[in-house]
């Protein structure tokens, strides 16, 4: 299991600043809701996880609430179930910060795809999520690829973006 030092994560978050705008654009496509529409136990889960952080925005998607908040130089998001259980926290990162093994895997297995966005995901263990994009004449194709922190491929998932 890889362990990130506070300085290591801070550096990644600083570099991720350029991805913040892309993440905000994607988030704005969701249903924004006011703080008084958040169930108490969902808000409590967030405040228990991040007691010193104020949310910038709350979103509602089917079965989940998403809290968006600012870090030092980026925007992060936390997904919480309707029942108040924490699912994941995601931080955008610069694709230059991805492990060499991960980049090699992409080049070999997805040579025509471009990286759309990259995230450092915090769940049980930290991992990377890389959303790749293939421009097509009909409908563009997006895939979310999941990797361990040492660049080992874990799984692929089709992703919808408008």
Image (cartoon, rainbow, N blue to C red):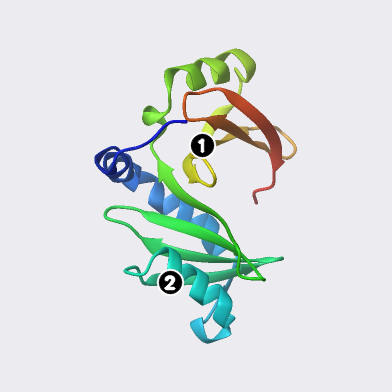
Asked if labels 1 and 2 touch by Cβ distance under 8 angstroms, the answer is no
Residue lying at the far front in this picture: please name it. 1
- Left or right: 160 with respect to 94? right
Q: Residue at 43% of width from left, 18% of height from top?
A: 100
> Can you see residue 133?
yes
Spatial CA distance of label 2 from label 1 is 23 Å
| Residue carrying label 1 | 127
Disc on the earlier residue, 2 or 1: 2
Residue 115 in the image: state x and y as whole percent.
52, 32
From the viewer's perspective, is residue 101 above or below residue 58?
above
* The label number, if any, that marks residue 146 in the structure image: none
In the displayed structure, 101 sits above or below 23; it is above
Numbered disc 2: secondary structure: helix
Tell me where residue 13 appears, x and y as whole percent: 32, 45
Residue placed most toward the observer, 120 or 136: 120
The 10 Å Cα crowd at callout 2, few under 14, some 14 to 19, many 20 or more, is some
Q: Residue farthest to the right?
A: 138
Within 10 Å of disc 1 (Cα), the crowding (few <14, some 14-19, many 20+) is: many
Seen at 36% across and 72% down, the residue is 54
Task: Where is residue 92? Give x, y as percent.
Answer: 43, 45
Report the residue marked by disc 2: 47
Residue 22 % position (x, y): 46, 50
Q: Secondary structure at mark 1?
A: strand
> Please, is residue 128 above or below residue 64 in the view?
above
Residue that appears at 47% across and 24% down: 150
- Residue 22 appears left or right of 7: right
Task: Let me know if residue 38 appears in the view.
Answer: no
Q: Residue at x 56, y 17 (%)?
A: 105
Using the image as rendered, state which of residue 86 and residue 111 is in the foreground: 86
Question: Quick check: 25 above or below 118?
Answer: below
């Amino acid at each position: 299991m890889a362990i990130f030092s506070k300085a290591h994560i801070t550096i990644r978050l600083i570099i991720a600043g350029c991805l913040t705008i892309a993440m905000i654009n994607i988030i704005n496509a969701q249903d924004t809701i006011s703080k008084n529409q958040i169930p108490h136990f969902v808000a409590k889960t967030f405040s228990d996880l991040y007691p010193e952080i104020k949310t910038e925005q709350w979103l509602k998607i089917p079965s989940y609430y998403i809290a968006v908040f600012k870090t030092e130089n980026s925007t992060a998001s936390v997904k919480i179930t309707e029942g108040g259980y924490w699912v994941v926290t995601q931080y955008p990162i610069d694709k230059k910060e991805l492990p060499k093994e991960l980049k090699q895997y992409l080049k070999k297995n997805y040579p025509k795809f471009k990286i759309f966005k990259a995230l450092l995901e915090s769940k049980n263990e930290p991992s990377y999520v890389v959303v790749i994009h293939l421009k097509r004449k009909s409908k563009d194709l997006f895939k979310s690829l999941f990797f361990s922190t040492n660049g080992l491929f874990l799984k692929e998932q089709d992703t919808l973006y408008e």
